[in-house]
Amino acid sequence: MDLDVFVSAHRAEWDRLDALLRRRRRLTGPEADELVTLYQRTATHLSLIQSSAPDPRVIGRLTQLVARARSAVTGTRRASWRDVTDFLLRGFPAAVYRARHWWVPTALISTAIAALIGWWIGTHPDVQASIAAPSELREMTRPGGQYETYYSSHPAASFAAQVWTNNAQAAAMCLVLGVFLGLPVLWILFQNMLNVGVGIGLMASVGRLDTFLGLILPHGLLELTAVFVAAGTGLRLGWTVIDPGPRTRRTALAEEGRAALGMAIGLALVLFISGAIEGFVTPSGLPTWARIGIGIAAELAFLTYVYVLGGRAVREGETGDVAEPERSALQPTAA
């Protein structure tokens, strides 16, 4: 392609499209039709130049024109309560359901690792000594010690907000950093399991494992499930970089990335619930069986939500991606 000849042949159309866009609120019917036609042609011109004779200056101008024209043609769309309902009842549970083959194994393996770390620490006094001095260990594990007072050391509302912020940040990092082949996700996951394993080991070494489980299970079941979902989805995103399947790598990453970002919003809501449980239920005066029962009920409710609503939505074709009109164009419309 001779770029200069091509530009000379189509410059008038581009200038006309620019002029129509400048006065798009005052267009007549025929002018609106002309704008749509020129938008389609310019998108095709942009595709041809990108593939045959890429020139940064021309590509920059046409990209801007196509973006402005697309906005004018499709219009702006405001979110409604229907969008929120659709996301909560279809989009989010469908995305979590589709990723189940990643986050369920992640949960099982991570739990086994935490239990193994706990057993190793609990049965090896020398390992315990490397963690902290004996006096510090006694202070952490004694009745009324740091492990127990941790959950009641701050006002419930502020503590719940702090927990929610930290966990939501960890989940978001798992989702976003998964694109780096999943390696940062594995590190974040290991750090979480290490913290749990240390608590299990130290409390088990003094015969107070039941107390520890009574403190962590009410909120930990739902909280860790949310982290496992985020980690599994991040690992899936990393694998998409390696093996995009029948889709192009760019298309696969766009689709899976949009679904993952939507999951970040949904998981923030899930972690808000677990944070509320940790702030108000875990340190409460309720019997241990009641606190654990609340945690189990919350966990079962989430799994039912995912497998019933999410499974149904996936069978109906939902993927968790944004609505098609909201996606970036994958290819220009033919003129």
Image: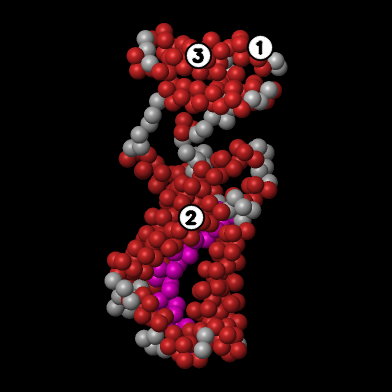
The residue carrying mark 2 is 172
Q: Amino acid at mark 1?
A: Val
Is 313 contained in the magenta span? Answer: no
Reading the image, the residue beneath label 3 is 15
**Is residue 313 toward the left or the right of residue 145 in the image?**
right
**Residue at horizontal 40%, vertical 76%?**
215
Mark 3 and mark 1 lie on one chain; the one further toward the N terminus is 1
Is residue 193 something one can see in this rendering?
A: yes
Q: Which residue is mark 1?
A: 5
Residue numbers of the magenta segment = 206-235
Instruction: Please tell me how crowded label 3 is: few (under 14), some (14-19), or many (20+) other residues with Cα within 10 Å.
Output: few
Among the 4 quarters of the image, the one containing residue 165: bottom left
Residue 11 lies left or right of residue 143; in this view the side is: right
**231 within the magenta span:** yes
The N terminus - image quarter: top right
Image point (56%, 56%), residue name:
232
In the rendered image of this protein, does residue 54 appear above or below residue 204?
above
Q: Nearer the viewer, residue 1 or 40?
A: 1
Q: Amino acid at mark 2?
A: Ala
Based on the displayed image, in which of its 4 quarters is residue 287 positioned?
A: bottom left
| Nearer to us: label 3 or label 2 | 3
